[in-house]
Structure formats: structure tokens, C-alpha cells
Image (cartoon, helix red, strand yellow):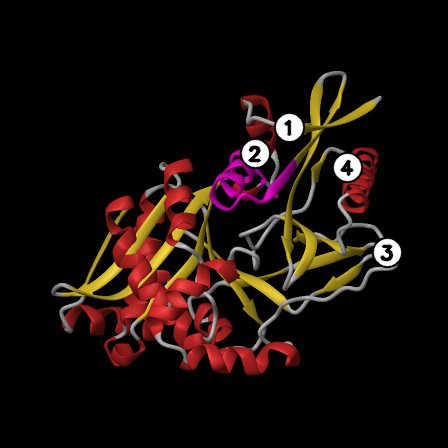
Amino acid sequence: MIKVDICITPIREIGDYVRKKDQGKICHLPEWSSMINRTFGHEVFYLVARRCNLVCGVLPLTRVNSRIFGNRIISQAFSNYGGPLVDNSDVLDELMNYAYELAREHECSFIEFRNIEPLPYDLSIQRDKVCMVLSLKSDPDEMWRSIRSEIRNRVRKAERSGLIAKTGGQELLDEFYRLWSVRMHQLGTPCYPKGLFKSILETFPEQSRIFVVQLENQILGTMFAYSFNGMAQCRWAATNVEVNKMAPNTLLYWSALKYYCRAGVQLFDFGRSTVGSSQYEFKRRWGSQPVQLNYQFWVCPSKKLSLVRPDNPKYIRKVEIWKKMPLWLTRLLGPCLSSKLP
């Protein structure tokens, strides 16, 4: 018999289960759910299925309720990935049915499952995004030789221009956030609060890293990444577009790849992209391969699926207005909005 419960506090048994799953990501850990709850106050439901008292499946859920954007459940919030990890289809059915009941009980419009492999149910699906993943070498020199000459030339150009790369943790948070929030303003996107990044660094100090590229004391590029289960993920990155000719972005990514090669990580995830976009092409030139994302949606009967996306005609004008607002104001208002846009 399969029994499903909501896990209140992280326990080692669950973490071990996530780690042994090939599709297990850092966002599948109960610590990620607890971090979201502490940082934003969102209600989290970490579902654990057991058979004979042994963990046989997990499904992390976060309820995000907003007067502006609606009431919905996401697996998993503030991540490109999510969805269930299970031993078999029977466990999957039990976890999914439990999730549906939670959504109905809390009057949510829908549940979003951020899967790699599609779930075998009749759900709405979006397949317009991929994550670009590169296999790493154990030797940075071998990795260097494996990438295209055009990439190597841009790294050399950055170094000849006097750019220096470094990596760290909490001590680089202010520098990361300063540049990243500027770039989000330029793109018309509300920035997450600095507290999110601080919480990730505090919750996962061994897994999280900040990378920066600087010229003297000026930060020209920055990246927030973390690693888990043999894969490093670049989750947030930004560069000063005014100095793109100096190739800070290329040096930034090379410094991250070199670091993770030395750390024994097998894969590097450049992050989510739309196929054919400029970001997609930049990542592809490194030799990364697209991994299809299958985002699926269970919609509550009588409810309507309404997604908040910058390419939604409903929000295009709002994006343009945001770009024209003063930076200080977007830094003030951005975290209030983005906490509801996970």
C-alpha cells in the first residue's frame, strides 16, 4: 500500500532518495521548499510517498497566491525544473491525485509541472523552451581544446583587455545583485529580491557559487550558479552590455566551466532558452545540446489557464513601461512583483 504525506521538515532519507534519481535536481530537495517558505512566505507542500515505510516518490509543490496574477501551484517555484520523482506509475498516480486535491481544496486555478519527461496524462503542455546542457571534461585544458576556436579567441580577447574572473559566495552577493538588477531593468523584468539569493547561499553553501568578471574595480559580468547530482546550473547571469566588445560574457562562462571541471562536475546547464533566440545560439556555440522542457498544466474544472509571460500580448506594454521607470523604483517595486512570478 502506498501512503502519501506532507513532509514538514527535511530528513536525510528524502534527500538520499532525490540524489539517487537521475532527474533529481536541487529544487526537488525539501530544503528548497523550506527556503521558499522562509524567504517569501509561500505555502509549500512537500509530498512524500512511502511503501512499507520506504520513500518511493516525492513531489514538491509551492502555492503562489496573488491578487494580480492569481492563485496557482507550481512544481517547482524559482526553478527551471520540478515535477515528481517516482519509482513507478502507481506511485505517480497517488502523488498526482493528492496534488489535484490540494489544488481544489485551496481553490487554485491550475498546477504547473516543470518536467523534462512529459507526464502520461491528458494535461495542457508547453514545449517552447529548452535547457542547453554541455558535457564537461575532468581536465580544464582538455575542455579548453574541445570548445570552438571563436570562443577561445573571445576569451583571450577579454583577458588581453585586462578582464579578470573570480568566484566566491556571500562576499560577492552585493556585486552580483547590483549588476543583475540593472540588466533586469533593461529587459523590462521585475528583479527578485536580494534575499532570495542570500537564502540560496545560506541553505546550500557548498553547492552555490557566484562568478564575476571585472576590470579593475568595475564588475562587468556576473553569474549565480549551483551544482547538484553532477550537474551545475547557471540560473542567473548578467553583463554590462556597454562593454560587450570586450567579451566579458565569454570569459564569465569560461571561468564557470573551468571551475566546475576542476570540481568534478559532469554537466553544465547554461539555462533555459527559446529555440532560435540569440541566447540559444550563444549557448549552442559552446557545444551544448538542447534538452526539451515539457511544462504541463492541470487546470481545475471551471478555472482558466492564464500564464504570466513577457511575450503575452497582455504584458508587452507593461514590459516597455517597466524599462522606462527609474532604476531605483524598479529595485523597490520589483521584489514585490517577482515574488509572485516564480
**Does 311 appear above or below 102?**
below
Q: Identity of the amino acid at label 1?
A: Cys
The dot on residue 7 is 1
In depth, the one of 305 and 120 nearer the eye is: 305
Label 1 residue SS: strand
Asked whether the residues under the numbered discs 4 and 2 touch, taking CB atoms below 8 Å apart as contact, a structural biologist would say no
Q: Which of pointers 4 and 3 lies earlier in the amino acid sequence?
A: 4
Q: Residue 30 carries which label?
A: 2
Q: Do the residues labelled 1 and 2 touch (CB within 8 Å)?
A: yes
Cα–Cα gap, marks 1 and 2: 8 Å
Determine which residue is flagged by label 3. 122
Residue at image mark 4: 95
Residue kind at label 2, given as amino acid type: Pro
For marks 3 and 1 on the same chain, the one whose residue lies earlier in the sequence: 1
Which residue is at the front of the view, 258 or 194? 194
Label 4 packing within 10 angstroms: few (<14), some (14-19), many (20+): many
Q: Please tell me in which quadrant of the rendered image residue 311 appears.
A: bottom right
Q: What residue type is labelled 4?
A: Leu
The Cα–Cα distance between marks 4 and 2, rounded to whole angstroms, is 16 Å
**Residue at 37%, 38% in the rendered image:** 202
- Point out residue 268 in the picture as x, y percentages from the top left corner: 45, 53
Secondary structure type for disc 4: helix
